[in-house]
Amino acid sequence: MTTTDTARGPVIAGLGITETGKVYGRSAADFAADAVRRAAEDAGLALSDLDGLLTSSGVSTGVGLSLQSQLGLRDLRLLSEMQAYGSTAGGMVQYAAMAVRAGMAEAVACVFADAPLKEKTSTGAAYTGAGLGTHGWAGLTAAAGMMSATPRYAVAARRHMDTFGTTSEQLAHIAVAQRAWAGMNPRAQFRDPITVEDHQASRLIAEPLHLLDCCLVSNGGVAVIVTTAERAAHLRRPPVHVLGWAQAHPGYPMHRGSDFGLVSGAAQAGPEALKMAGVGIDDVDVAELYDCYTFTVLLTLEDYGFCAKGEGGAFAASGALAPGGSLPVNTGGGQLSSYYMWGMTPLSEAVIQARGEAGERQVPRHDVVLVSGNGGCFDHHSTLVLSPHPHA
């Protein structure tokens, strides 16, 4: 790698997290603007230093190209609204990394925000029917009960169980481990410890998934600033180097011959991102994995190669993912217990860990941090490899 390549190597230099959770009276656009301002302040940059902006929103609307005007940004060299659901955060960082490395931009803000929660409205109502059509052929799946993401993930989990013998109790260990991490995270919405018995006693949402298999719903926003290593050397925060990245979009046909529920896009994107970073799966010190459901974590662990295919349940039950385990996973509590900001949840915790700023939950080794994003129901995947150190 040349001196020029090293100087223009992409890094995350700023992180901004708004209040998250049951925070009412603010729009997604308000949260997004707040997050970008916080990220710029964290990096030691003025808003006028930004020349790129990538935006994404969840089920609520309002985080689009107009955010440029809301922030008063002028003469941007890069501006786009992106959407690949939970894989978008990783995708935004990838495009920003390519832009700064190519000289297309110098400092790019990537932001996600959402505000689905409303006062005096149930949490479950926030996503009920979101984005689902009920006309034509779509009405057939709706009539069968496929009215939200949870039944789709339940079908995927059941297929894995029927194929490999995975159990609900094994999924429970993922929820329990992440709640243990959340107990050390002041930002986490849920911090009280839970047990496998608590998981099993929680009500079924869509068999085999219990309530404690399912992620939170949160209002809020998260932003990161991507710039060059050369620029970051003069900024306020320690840089987090983006060493590798990749995407995968399997395009599963919904028929019995596909790998739906058995293999995710992590199987393709993981090895490609690690190869770009010049490391192997055994070099990963901490993994921040997209966890809309416990089963998402299990399948991603298998597909990255942390354990063999079909052995994700046993791996989780071994205690490997919990504090003190062999593979720290979702060290802030993830979307199951901390806050649900789509792919920005694992990304934000990865930045905090790579900086060594996680306090009580800080893992001692954090030289290589793997981050995943998952969109749709295993339809889209993004992988990032981050490090406090540049390429060797």
Image: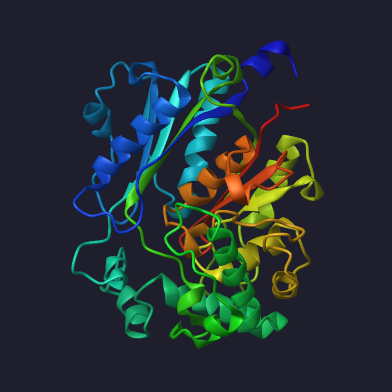
Residue 358 on image: x %, y %: 58, 44
The residue that appears at 23% across and 45% down in the rendered structure is 62
Residue 237 on image: x %, y %: 54, 26
Give above or below for 136 relative to 263: below
Give above or below for 25 relative to 335: above
The residue that appears at 21% across and 62% down in the rendered structure is 118
The quadrant holding residue 323 is bottom right
Image side of residue 215 versus residue 279, left or right: left
Residue 174 on image: x %, y %: 61, 69
Image side of residue 136 versus residue 331, left or right: left
Q: Is residue 199 visible?
A: yes
Q: Residue furthest top?
A: 3
The residue that appears at 79% across and 45% down in the rendered structure is 283
- In depth, the one of 376 and 133 nearer the eye is 376
Give above or below for 319 relative to 19: below
Q: Residue furthest front?
A: 360
The quadrant holding residue 78 is top left
The quadrant of the rendering that contains the C terminus is top right
Give above or below for 283 relative to 301: above
